[in-house]
Amino acid sequence: GQQVMQIPQYQHVQEGEDFTTYCNSSTTLSNIQWYKQRPGGHPVFLIQLVKSGEVKKQKRLTFQFGEAKKNSSLHITATQTTDVGTYFCAGLGGTYKYIFGTGTRLKVLA
Amino acid sequence: KAGVTQTPRYLIKTRGQQVTLSCSPISGHRSVSWYQQTPGQGLQFLFEYFSETQRNKGNFPGRFSGRQFSNSRSEMNVSTLELGDSALYLCASSLRGAEMNTEAFFGQGTRLTVV
């Protein structure tokens, strides 16, 4: 069945450093969504990518969708302590359901 | 407008018991999905309901079941609880109909502990 892997599982960075998490699907995706879950909170939608090769930016966050629509990445420039949390990708495949990646837990050291 | 409401927030049950969790979606949302979240497994898809019909399901045993009412509120039930069912159960509602390209709004979750 469809699987979505996310790496790394954990990442500790110094405040001000950059951070990237990668999402890889075993099958071609119709679209991919990214969510952020703060410690003790619930996932909150960040963005959706639909087109092959699409790049979207939200302030310091840059999201990319691969040309083959099987992988995606989230890059944060100059991390801040408010970026702490777990970032999930969720891919929509042929099964008409979103499969979530395993998540990347980001810790930012001040 | 009000967000997704899940009740109860916390629950402690004994092995072998059964439990029912409730989810009230955002007004107007007809799609409700359920996820199990554990530290090592991330978010595992349980099932999705749309207009009172189960539209999709994940790979969970038959002990996990759900339903959706005409007002879009949803319940999930777990029978014969096992220790491994301890998890955060998240419900998400959305405007997804035939078109799936919309975001999901998650509730705060129900933390279930099985002892």
Image: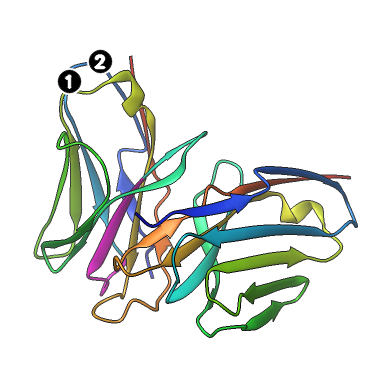
Is residue B31 a member of the stretch shown in magenta? Answer: yes
What is the x, y in percent for residue B97?
A: 24, 77
Crowding near the residue tagged with mark 2, few <14, some 14–19, many ≥20 C-alpha atoms within 10 Å: some
Q: Which region of the structure is painted magenta? A: B26-35
Numbered tag placed on residue B45 in the rendering = none
Residue B84, above or below A96:
above
SS at badge 1: loop
Q: Assess whether mark 1 and mark 2 are in contact (beta carbons under 8 angstroms).
A: yes
What is the x, y in percent for residue B33?
A: 29, 57
Left or right of residue A102, residue A61 in this image: right
C-alpha gap between disc 2 and disc 1: 6 Å
The quadrant of the rendering that contains the C terminus of chain A is top right
Left or right of residue A13, residue A38 in this image: left
In this rendered view, identify the residue nearer to me: A98 or B29. Answer: A98
The residue that mark 1 highlights is B17
In this rendered view, identify the residue nearer to me: B109 or B85. Answer: B85
What is the x, y in percent for residue A16?
A: 90, 57
Q: Chain of mark 2?
A: B
Residue A57, above or below A86:
below
Residue at point 84%, 59% (across, down)? A18
Residue at point 31%, 75% (across, down)? B95
Residue at point 37%, 38% (across, down)? B9
Do discs 2 and 1 share a chain?
Answer: yes
Give the amino acid type for the residue marked by disc 2 in the picture: Thr
Is residue A64 a member of the stretch shown in magenta? Answer: no
The residue that mark 2 highlights is B14
Crowding near the residue tagged with mark 1, few <14, some 14–19, many ≥20 C-alpha atoms within 10 Å: few
SS at badge 2: loop
What is the x, y in percent for residue B1?
A: 38, 71
Left or right of residue A80, residue A61 in this image: left
The quadrant of the rendering that contains the N terminus of chain A is bottom left
Q: Chain of mark 1?
A: B
